[in-house]
Amino acid sequence: MTTHAGRSRSATPASAPAVDTPVLATQELRVTFAGRGGRAGAHAVDGVNLDLRTGEIVALVGESGCGKSTLARALLGLERPSAGRVVFEGEPLRYATRALRAYRRRVQLVLQDPTGALNPRHTVYDAVAEGLRIHEGHARDERERVAGALSRSGLRPPERFLLSYPHELSGGQRQRVVIAGALILDPEVIVADEPVASLDVSVRGEILRLLLRLRADPGLSALVVTHDLGLAWNIADRVAVMYLGRIVEVGPVEEVLTAPSHPYTQALLSVLPESGASSPVVLAGEPPDPTRVPGGCRFHARCQVLASGRAQGVADRCRGEDPGVLEGGTEARVACHWANAGD
């Protein structure tokens, strides 16, 4: 796979601090939704250790329904963990109203649908100023800060957009307004949930370039939730691959996306033109029901390596032994008996 133009890559971002404390992390995080009518609960997030360093972009990738958005909501304090914890700057997240309010000022969400995220009756000015007013009231420098956030998000000159309504903007401009609304509070972390999924191909590149420019801010980190490995390749420093509530592979993006270890990652990559794969890997069946997590490796029933007989030396372990939860940190790790056996 070749690197796309316009991106200089390294395993560790140049802006990363010397200290080893992540700005945001999860520790053995679990989120289980109770079943109805006596049904078993759904293990949406089932033991996740994930670190985000200062100045770093981490892409969280996987199929729909794997738990990515639930993990993102837990990181934002919108879902309380069933077990484990979220840690911000070395301190566990507290769920008291005042503590959450202060936390959400510093960790901001960018939604995937800018049309749904913006009130059609509010001007761009009011949409961007909303978060500022919630946290600071009507600040004297409000107009200056709104204009600055719009300019930083690429809407220049900002005065041209202040009194516009969402329906008067293009899809890319609306997404920039949403990003400006997140930036106005100068957060340390942005959690972007499928930030280009609802945009036309013609404007996806614009938003990607914006995210890369924001990456140059030494105090800003981002977790980008996506099903698009091509997007991860373009913008991320590290990538975490999620399947059925767990991280199954994590590491520097170049390492994971050029030499994937987990069969699931290999299958996801095989459909990309850049992968060089002779043919896409077609996974059998649908992802398992999170209320009935299979024993052994949770991917084994769909695993193309196991089905082909190449995992013969560890096949029994694949079917009967859980590979376990991956640790946090920045090193490359994989939860796969076959990959760890070196076959």
Image (tube, rainbow, N blue to C red):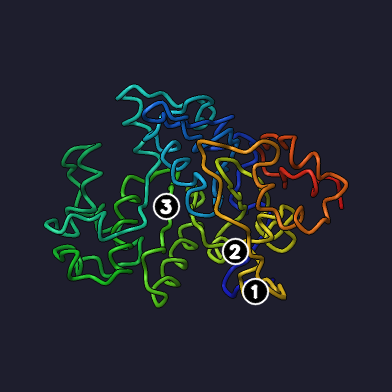
293 shown above or below 38: below
Disc 3 secondary structure class: strand
At x 24%, y 65%, the residue is 158
Residue that carries the numbered disc 3 in the rendered image: 193
Disc 2 secondary structure class: helix
Give whichever of 19, 224 is nearer the camera. 224
> Does residue 2 appear anywhere in the picture?
no
**Three-letter amino acid code of the residue under disc 2:** Trp
The picture places residue 147, in percent across and down from the top left corner, at 25, 59
20 shown above or below 178: above
**Three-letter amino acid code of the residue under disc 3:** Asp
Disc on res. 120: none
- Work out which quarter of the rendered image holds the N terminus and state it: bottom right
Mark 2 Cα-neighbour bin, 10 Å: few <14, some 14–19, many ≥20 = many
The picture places residue 37, in percent across and down from the top left corner, at 37, 28
How far apart, in angstroms, are the residues tagged by discs 3 and 2? 16 Å
- 13 vs 63, left or right, is right
Which comes before the other along the chain, label 2 or label 1? 2
Which comes before the other along the chain, label 3 or label 2? 3
- 157 vs 301, left or right, is left
Label 2 or label 1, whichever lies nearer to me, is 1
How far apart, in angstroms, are the residues tagged by discs 3 and 1? 24 Å
The picture places residue 243, in percent across and down from the top left corner, at 59, 47
Instruction: Tell me the quarter of the picture where residue 125 sits.
Output: bottom left
At x 45%, y 37%, the residue is 75
Answer whether labels 2 and 1 touch (C-beta < 8 Å): yes
Number of numbered discs visible in the structure rendering: 3
Residue that carries the numbered disc 1 in the rendered image: 274
Q: Residue furthest left?
A: 121
**Three-letter amino acid code of the residue under disc 1:** Glu
How far apart, in angstroms, are the residues tagged by discs 2 and 1? 10 Å
Disc on res. 233: 2
